[in-house]
Amino acid sequence: MSYFTALLVPSGRSWGSRDADLMEVDSLDELVDTVRDQVDGGTGIVVLEREDEWFALVRVDGDDDARVFVSDLPAARSSRFSGVFADPDVWSDAGSLRAAGLVPGGATDGFDSGYGYHDDEEDSSASESEEDAPAVTEVPWAGDLSLLEDMGVGGETLKTVVEDDADDPARALTELGERVGFLDLLETLR
């Protein structure tokens, strides 16, 4: 399976792309710096995709904090781009915190339900309350649902598209690209 990366730049109702070496980034900060160098204070949306497994959108608007959405956080965190998805502070929403490895009972990998890093030895009470935890769906998307809201794709729509096509993330990305208007460019870049 291969990776695909692209830096897309909105310009009115059309889209362009920038030539950026995204395969070499090792962290979210490095990715954001790369985008900022290319968009000169504007907006850039990075598409990261692992064929047949997951996709991610990273939006950079000027000097604002990056906003991230990923269709399958555990898969993305075990990929070549793991460093981009390592910071728990960007996961403001999650389809399933347990599936995303952010609550006890899942593959926590050091992250707690408050999205902060914790030491398992310091928090032994977490496993005691596991039985009291509410049931969660096992859809492991995570990130900012409002990422594309100003482009015509609200949070509920983004969530529905990703959950409906959980078994085919490429189809979900295609639908989002069609709704936002970057699908033709994306297909050209592929």
Image (spheres, rainbow, N blue to C red):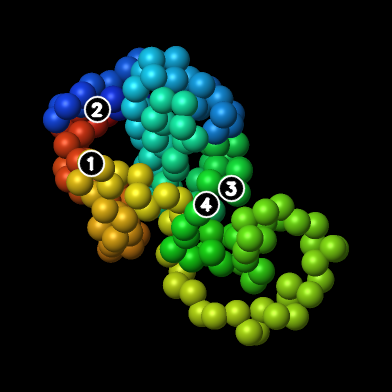
**Earlier-in-chain disc, 1 versus 3:** 3
C-alpha span from label 1 to label 2:
9 Å
CA–CA distance in space, label 2 to label 3: 26 Å
Give the quarter of the image for residue 102. Answer: bottom right
Q: Residue at x 60, y 49 (%)?
A: 88
x and y percentages locating residue 19 in the rendered image? 35, 15
Tell me the amino acid under the disc marked 1: Met
Q: Amino acid at mark 4?
A: Trp
In screen coordinates, is 173 left or right of 29? left
Which residue is rendered at x = 38% and y = 40% of the image?
A: 57
Residue marked by disc 1: 151
Q: Secondary structure at mark 3?
A: helix
**CB under 8 Å between discs 2 and 3:** no
Q: CA distance from mark 1 to mark 3?
A: 24 Å
Q: Residues within 10 Å of mark 4 (few under 14, many from 20)?
A: many
Badge 3 crowding class, 10 Å Cα cut-off, few under 14, some 14 to 19, many 20 or more, is few
First in sequence: mark 1 or mark 4? 4
Specify the label residue 10 is tagged with. 2
Q: Position of residue 174 (x, y in %)?
A: 22, 44
Q: Quadrant of the C terminus?
A: top left
Instruction: Give percent across and percent down for residue 23.
Output: 48, 25
Residue at the spot of label 3: 89
The residue identified by callout 4 is 91
Residue 177 percent coordinates (x, y): 22, 41
Whole-angstrom CA distance, mark 4 to mark 3, is 6 Å
Quick one: 119 or 43, which is closer to the camera? 43
